[in-house]
Image (tube, rainbow, N blue to C red):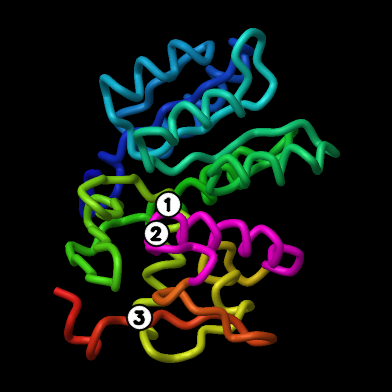
Amino acid sequence: MRDTMDGLDRSILIVDDEAELLEMVRGVFLRAGYRQVLTAADGPQALALCAASRPDIVILDVMMPGMDGFEVLRQLRRHSSVPVLMLTARGEAEDKFTGFACGADDYLAKPFLPRELLFRVQAILRRSAPSGRRVRLAAAEVDLENAEAHRGGEVTPLTAKELLLFRKLYENAGRIVTTGALCAAVCGPVWQGYESTLATHIRHLREKLEANPSKPVSIVTVKGLGYRLELPGAKGAAR
């Protein structure tokens, strides 16, 4: 994933079957100075562009004919941790939770203010910037630069939110990180109501990092408070 000084070289893929909305959203980012703005009108085209161009973020509409946004996201998550912001119909609360369960990083209900979309994308890109470290755990190793989990000879991509959560835990390795602090790390100051989704992200992280996810030894639950990351030996074991 590229990381430039002004961020305007980060590439954006917009996926929507409504041509007018697609062009409007594209214009928002072009006017903001982004130089690599790609568009796709359906799911198969989006997946092909992701494979060929490796965008830094995907803005993905839920309601599309044929292959909807959820299926695009499921297929994308099999091999990519690219951040995904989903666009949903206003009032469709279930879309929000389905999207997060599939690996979405944020969502925005239609109709939306162009400025809000721009700010959300900028925030996701800032949070998902790589740090260039690798962290060794009891059963796995996390490559923070490439957002990958290495375990038992297999490499599994981490979603942007999983990466943010892991970084927050790693920054406080050996100490309790409260549920609120973890939610705020991925959602910002308005995180109330996100707790159940956080538990889903933690479960997915454990599936990728623990030898036995039902008996975690690296990401430990501290009942009633939050979670704690346990590293082998001292914190210096990470490299």
Give the total of numbered labels: 3
Mark sitting on residue 163: 2
Callout 2–callout 1 Cβ contact below 8 Å:
yes
Horizontal and vertical percent position of residue 123: 47, 55
Q: Can you say whether 62 is above or below 142 in the image?
A: above
Please state if 71 lies on the left or on the right of 151 as rendered: right
Where on the picture, by quarter, is residue 64? top right
Mark sitting on residue 179: none
Residue, far left = 239
Q: Amino acid at mark 1?
A: Ala
Q: Which residue is mark 1?
A: 160
Please state if 213 lies on the left or on the right of 234 as rendered: right
**N-term-proximal mark, 1 vs 3:** 1
Q: CA distance from mark 1 to mark 3?
A: 16 Å
Q: Can you say whether 40 is above or below 227 in the image?
A: above
**N-term-proximal mark, 3 vs 2:** 2
Give the residue displayed 29% in from the left and 51% down from the top: 148
Q: Amino acid at mark 3?
A: Glu
Q: Amino acid at mark 2?
A: Leu
Q: Which residue is mark 3?
A: 171
Q: Which residues are magenta?
A: 191-215
Instruction: For label 3, count other residues whose C-alpha is less than 10 Å away and answer few (under 14), some (14-19) or many (20+).
Output: few
